[in-house]
Every structure is written in structure tokens, then in C-alpha cells.
Image (tube, rainbow, N blue to C red):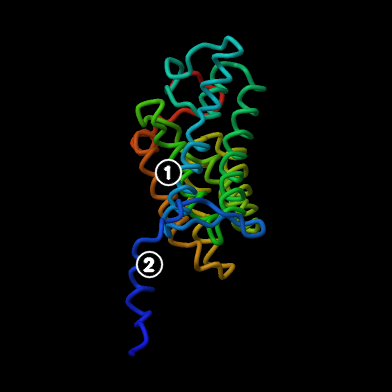
Amino acid sequence: MQPADTSDWASSASLHRPRQPLCWRAQGDELTTDIPWLAPAGVLLLGYLLGSIPFGLLLTRFFGAGDLRQIGSGNIGATNVLRTGRKGLAAATLLLDLAKGAAAVWIAGMLVPGGGILGGLAAFIGHCYPVWLRFNGGKGVATMMGVVLALHWPSAIVFAVVWLGLLAILRISSLAGMSAAISAPVSAAFFGRIELVLMLLALAMIVLWKHRANIDRLLNGTEPRIGKKSG
């Protein structure tokens, strides 16, 4: 009598075995999932939602400074908050926009190995193109600095020196911010962080694109300096 062929039975059993539900699992401090692309997608979504919080708009509304989109340049960033005359709110907006960029990098890096770059990129996109404001957000300088700070603090020091230095000397916020953004990929390359250069270059290009109206005014000599209410 021939022994039963168990290979066919095992194959059939594996086909009919109930599938385990797809789920997230913790491995140490990291988060894994049964779907390879789900973890990066989750990091991107989390970073975008965090970056899309319009702190400048929320603060000015909460403290009765008006709708920031109807003031000055209509931008939701710290420079336009300053045009309301509320220096404290402007400082808070700057710090919170910076913090959300850094937080997105740190949280993403803790959840997914190497996820910091994705989280920072998503937070920056969320700030510049928030779904809540019909994708019309800020210009990204403060949030970009937060991302750079979390990814590579020496480049963040260069960023801050260029930004604050030119702002103090020229009193032109747009020029200082654009110059600082451009300095990020340059300094990352100088320090040998080649894996960051392409991402930071993309962020810098978006900053320049968001400042295209400012660039036109700079070329025409009509870009306002800090302290003026128009522009």
C-alpha cells in the first residue's frame, strides 16, 4: 500500500488557511506592517497633516488679530503675522512652524527606519500646500529650517546664520529666507551629507517658487522691508 502523499494535502491546507488580518506591529521603538508600502505611506500622511497645521492663521484668529489671509501679503507665515503689529504672535508662529517640521522628522524616524526624510518632506509640503486652505499655504522657510535642524543640525546653524544675518543687514524677509533655503543643500553637500542634498534642493526650489512674486518685486526694486505694512 502506497503511503499518502502529504505534499498535496499541505499545499491545499495552506491555500484554505484563514488569512491573518493585516496589522501594524511594534518591534522595539519601530513600527512595522504586513504591507511593505503602508509604513512609508503612513509616515507621509502623518507628516503632511502635522505640517498642514496653519499656526499663524489659528493664532491671529484666536487672539483677535483678524484673518491673516486678508492682511498684508495674505501669507500665513510669521512675517505677515508681524504686519499685524503682534510681535509675540509672530515669534510664536515662527517657532511653531519650525517645530512642526522638526517634529515630523523625529516622529517619522522613530516609527520607520530612515523615515525622517519622508516625514520632513511631507511636513514641508503640508505647510506650503495645506488641504484645509485649498492648498494655499505658507512659503516654507521656517518649516524647512525645522526639517534641516532635525536631519542635520550643522546645516541648520548655517541656515540660521544666513537667514538672520541677511534679515538683520538688509531687512528684506523674502531675500533672507530664500538665501537661507538655498544654503541648506549647499551646506549638506559641504558636510558630506550627500543623502540629504537632493531632498533639500527640492525644498529650496519650492521655497523659490513660493516667493516668485517677491522675486519680481526684488527685480523691480519694490520689495518692502521689515516694518512696512504693505507687500
Q: Is residue 120 left or right of residue 161?
A: left
What is the x, y in percent for residue 35? 42, 57
For disc 1, the marked residue is: 207
Please name the residue shown 51% across and 49% down the image. 119
For this orientation, the residue located farthest to the front is 1
For disc 2, the marked residue is: 13
- Quick one: SS at disc 2? helix
What is the x, y in percent for residue 223? 42, 31
Q: Is residue 63 above or below residue 37?
A: above
Per the rendering, the mark at residue 26 is none
- Quarter of the picture containing the C terminus is top left
Please name the residue shown 52% across and 49% down the image. 120
- Quick one: SS at disc 1? helix
Please name the amino acid that badge 1 sits on.
Answer: Val
C-alpha span from label 1 to label 2: 57 Å
Nearer to me, 121 or 154: 121
Please name the amino acid that badge 2 sits on.
Answer: Ala
Q: Is residue 27 above or below residue 121?
A: below
What is the x, y in percent for residue 117? 51, 55
Q: Is residue 186 above or below residue 50?
A: below
Please name the residue shown 45% across and 51% down the image. 21
Q: Earlier in the sequence, mark 1 or mark 2?
A: 2
Q: Is residue 168 above or below residue 81?
A: below
